[in-house]
Amino acid sequence: MFAYLTAGESHGPALVGILDGIPAHLRLDVGAIDETLARRQGGYGRSARMKIERDQVEFLAGVRGSETLGSPIAVVVRNRDYLTPKVRALMDPLLGGGDPLTNPRPGHADYAGALKYRQRDLRNVLERASARETAMRVCLGAICAQLLGVLGIVTRSCVVRIGGVEAAELDDWKASDVEESDVRCPDRDAATRMIEAIDEAKRAGDTLGGQFLVRIDGMPVGVGSNRQPAQRLDGILAGALMGMQTVRAVEIGLGADVAAIPGSRAHDAFALDGGSVVRRTNRAGGIEGGMSNGEPIVVRVSVKPIPTLMKALPSVNLHEQTDAPATIVRSDVCVVPAAAIVAEAMVRLALMAPVLEKYGGDSVEETLDNLARSTQAAADLFARNLGTHVQ
Ligand code: EPS
């Protein structure tokens, strides 16, 4: 029903993506896709590579006159770095070559990938493992955002920790406060300290990880399913987010904190407010029984410090079988703000299958009709039930 694929090496000619299952008649705002791509390139602590790249989407298929056709969508984002003769000589798909990289970086895909694919040049592993590839995920996710937006489903993120600096607790935040911050943190005081921490890490040749929240508003009740483990919405979201290069932990609602508190403080009591059933808390983070429950979905994601350190970690030269520092390649000091943007994309991509499973539709109009009918039916069901009780 819905699928996507990406391909592309960090320093190859381009990143490409295919998105299959987007209904017909979605009017695309291409400027908004490019803006999202630019957002991923931003954030304090990125590498000099970001001055080279200016990611922009080009459509190859599935779109005509800025509207989706219902056929598979194919897109490309070109790597500007590839235009450099030195990079081209390394990475040309037919003629590329060069001295092998031999010293794996602890924490990176280098070592496991070399053994798995029997590659004597670590470059053949790291080119795909590089987070450059996330530009295409963000591109495809930005297309999905436009369909989800039509359905009223909006995903946002904000950074809440970089290294040892934590932002104040927050339930919600203003998107503009996030956009104005170089580290995508709405707590200004914490943001200043985060930037200082990144500067300090840079001076020390080190890197920093952190944490961000992803929040989905407008999700109708009943997306996802308790039918089978693979259909649970929490599992689907966690799997998608763990599918990012840097992610080490995903928590929903109270997350790991539920382990330490009694049931009386771990759940969200029901109450009646006028004719509506309401919750005063959202400890479950918007998902119960593997299904959306109508509350905002709130996910906390932890990412590791990236593994390329300018003050290289101890490693070995795999060719010479000698001790040697890990390979140093140009790298970022902190990718937490960028990772938050990638996480938004992963969430949007992950939501597509369960949302389309529930509402379906070959055209956006049909999907909207199905959503409206389903929402009305849910409201009617509750009213009828009350009626039956009264009789
Ligand atoms: C990356 C190393 C750096 C980052 C890159 C990810 O690239 P380079 O080696 O070309 O300087 O800038 O991230 C991106 C290119 C990007 O678009 O996010 C790595 O080793 O993972």
Image: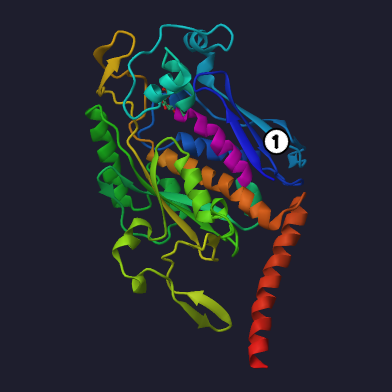
The image quadrant of residue 227 is: bottom right
Q: Is 105 above or below relative to 141?
A: above
In the image, residue 143 lies at what x, y percent? 63, 42
Total count of labels: 1
Residue 335 or residue 194, whichever sits in front: 335
- Quadrant housing the N terminus: top right
Asked whether residue 388 is in view, the answer is yes
In reply to whether residue 138 is colored magenta, the answer given is yes
Say which element carries label 1: strand
Q: Is 384 above or below relative to 120?
A: below
Residue for point 32% across, 36% down? 305
In the image, residue 174 lies at what x, y percent? 45, 56
The reply, left or right, for residue 149 in relation to residue 245 is right
Region in magenta: 130-144
The reply, left or right, for residue 121 in relation to residue 310 is right
Does the numbered disc 1 mark a residue whose Cβ is under 8 Å from ligand 1? no
Q: Is 222 above or below relative to 355?
A: below
Asked whether residue 32 is in view, the answer is no
**Type of secondary structure dominating the magenta stretch:** helix
The residue at which mark 1 appears reads as 73
In the image, residue 241 lies at what x, y percent? 47, 44
Residue for point 51% across, 7% down? 89
Q: Which quarter of the frame holds ligand 1? A: top left
